Amino acid sequence: MKFKVEKPKRVPAGRYEAEFVSMEERPGNPEYGGGVCYLWTWLVTDGPWKAQTVTTLSSSTVSPKSKAGLLLAGMAGASFDDLDGDEIDTDNFVGNVYQIVVEQKGEWPVVTSAQPLDD
């Protein structure tokens, strides 16, 4: 059997319109205390990187400065303080398109923020 080896295409740093696809629970890295982490996945919907997937990992901590807290507040279109006490189901965000910011962290691009598109 023959295999074709190709370097993966990685979305470069920048702003993109992207559909939120999912958030999946994953086991955390034992080197960092184990526990649970979450894999957030978007699909770029426009431009030369259309149909490329971009992801980010977050801890289960939801606070004003945590990645999960920043993403939840951003996707809800609210400040973190406005969401105090709310229960947010990320399944409600699936299928919605957001403006995401992708930054290069080491070798991998990661989503650092997501905001609803302007109407």
Image (cartoon, grey):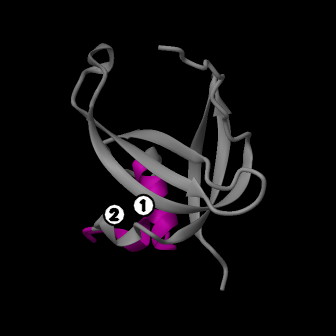
Residues 84 and 6: in front is 6
Residues 50 and 64: in front is 50
Measured as percent of width and height from the top left, residue 27 is found at: 24, 30
Decide whether residue 23 is among the magenta residues.
no
Principal secondary structure, stretch drawn in magenta: helix
Q: Secondary structure at mark 1?
A: helix
Q: Is residue 62 visible?
A: no
Up the image or down, 85 lies above or below 30; here it is below
Q: Could you tell whether 1 is left or right of 108 in the image?
A: left
Q: Residue at x 46, y 49 (%)?
A: 41
Q: Secondary structure at mark 2?
A: helix
Q: Could you tell whether 15 is left or right of 94 in the image?
A: right
Up the image or down, 33 lies above or below 74; here it is above
Measured as percent of width and height from the top left, residue 1 is found at: 47, 14
Q: Residue at x 66, y 86 (%)?
A: 119
Residues 3 and 36: in front is 3
Q: Which mark is residue 11?
A: none
Label 1 crowd (10 A; few <14 / some 14-19 / many >=20): many
Q: Residue at x 44, y 58 (%)?
A: 21
Q: Amino acid at mark 1?
A: Leu
Q: Which mark is residue 72?
A: 1
Of badges 2 and 1, the one in the foreground is 2
Q: Residue at x 67, y 79 (%)?
A: 118
Residue underneath mark 2: 90
Extreme residue in the right direction: 48
Boundaries of the magenta span:
68-87
